[in-house]
Amino acid sequence: MKYAFIQRHRRVWPISVQCRVLGVSVAGYHEHFVRRASDDHRRHLSDDALLVHIKAIHAQSRGSYGWPRVWRDLLARGIRVGKERVQKLMQLHGIRAKGKRRFKVTTDSRHDLPIAPNLLGQQFNVAEPDKVWVGDITYIATDEGWLFLAVVIDLFSRQVVGWSLRSDMTRSIVIDALRMAWFKRHPGKNAGVIFHSDRGSQYASGEFTAVLAEYGITSSMSRKGNCWDNACSETLFGSLKVERLHGQRFNTRRQAMDEVIGWLLWYNRERLHSTLDYVSPMRFEENWQANQPRQASA
């Protein structure tokens, strides 16, 4: 490489003369070695310096990242370090992800409304965006009373493409979340979207099924009493509550709404998702779009 040649012979010929002969700029030569020195510094961080980066990443995730995500985030920032070293440092200093908790089912499936067949069959890996959406409802306690959250998740990227927050758990909350997803994504009535949910009365209501029909979406529902059929939404809600809501007391529903929306935006844009090879849902979709062959212009 030209820069390496110049460096080896800098005591023989002036750097400016070598750069002129080899057709490179003096500024480019110096920038090259500044970058290399910076890379060397990152590769040979002391434990104290690495710990600063680890604590910063852990704090930015609000304590939600364990060592696998911290390690992946370090790599994404250009800090080349072994995962064993990150794991040991975090263990030594008591830095760990917030623990998992169990949460109760919120929807009521004890009704006589029509039930759609289970078209998903626990097949959670989807090849394209806007082919399978998953819906679910959870709740958050506040001093003003319950706050309910309904979401719509695109199974392809696990991105939350629609949501609604209300003080009641009527069919309106799931209709609002679905409409948000539809106007955000615009899949088209002939896209063949499947919407999967549990058997809750909100999803089985005539009003909700009418909106599905309006958009050309096919309904799918979990089997009776089988929480694994909607595992992706359960995982999302568990992460939300453990990583952002657990241990907080909300005086008002507005306070809880702000925290929930803030987490959803962070989750979509930044949170490293293990199912997506540790990139965020939005970055996963961007990478997929970038790899699609461009259609020839008419």
Image: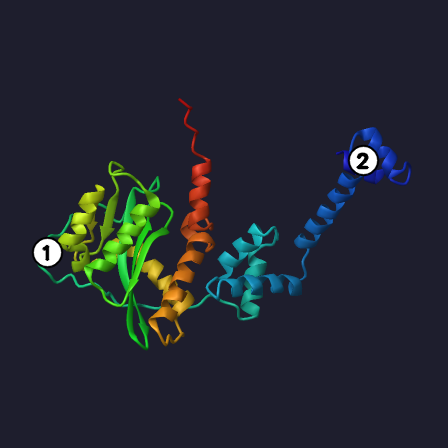
Residue that appears at 57% across and 55% down: 74
The amino acid on which the numbered mark 2 sits, given as a three-letter code, is Phe
Question: Residue 12 versus residue 129: which sits nearer the camera?
Answer: 129
Q: Quadrant of the N terminus?
A: top right
Categorize mark 2 by other alpha carbons within 10 Å: few (<14), some (14-19), many (20+).
Answer: few
From the image, state whether disc 1 or disc 2 is nearer to you: 1
Left or right: residue 196 versus residue 274 is left
Q: Quadrant of the C terminus?
A: top left
The amino acid on which the numbered mark 1 sits, given as a three-letter code, is Leu
Image coordinates for residue 255, horizontal then vertical, percent: 39, 70
Image coordinates for residue 177, horizontal then vertical, percent: 28, 55
Task: Identify the residue position indicated by label 1 in the image.
Answer: 113
Can residue 118 be seen in this snapshot?
no
* Residue 63 higher or lower than 179, as above or below: below
Categorize mark 1 by other alpha carbons within 10 Å: few (<14), some (14-19), many (20+).
Answer: some
Image coordinates for residue 164, horizontal then vertical, percent: 30, 59
Residue that appears at 22% across and 64% down: 169
Q: First in sequence: mark 1 or mark 2?
A: 2
Q: Which mark is residue 5?
A: 2
* Residue 85 higher or lower than 93, as above or below: above
Q: Give the secondary structure at mark 2.
A: helix
* Residue 266 higher or lower than 130, as above or below: below
* Residue lying at the far right of the rendered structure: 12
Q: Give the secondary structure at mark 1.
A: loop
Residue that appears at 17% across and 50% down: 209
Question: Residue 204 versus residue 7: which sits nearer the camera?
Answer: 204
* Residue lying at the far top of the rendered structure: 298
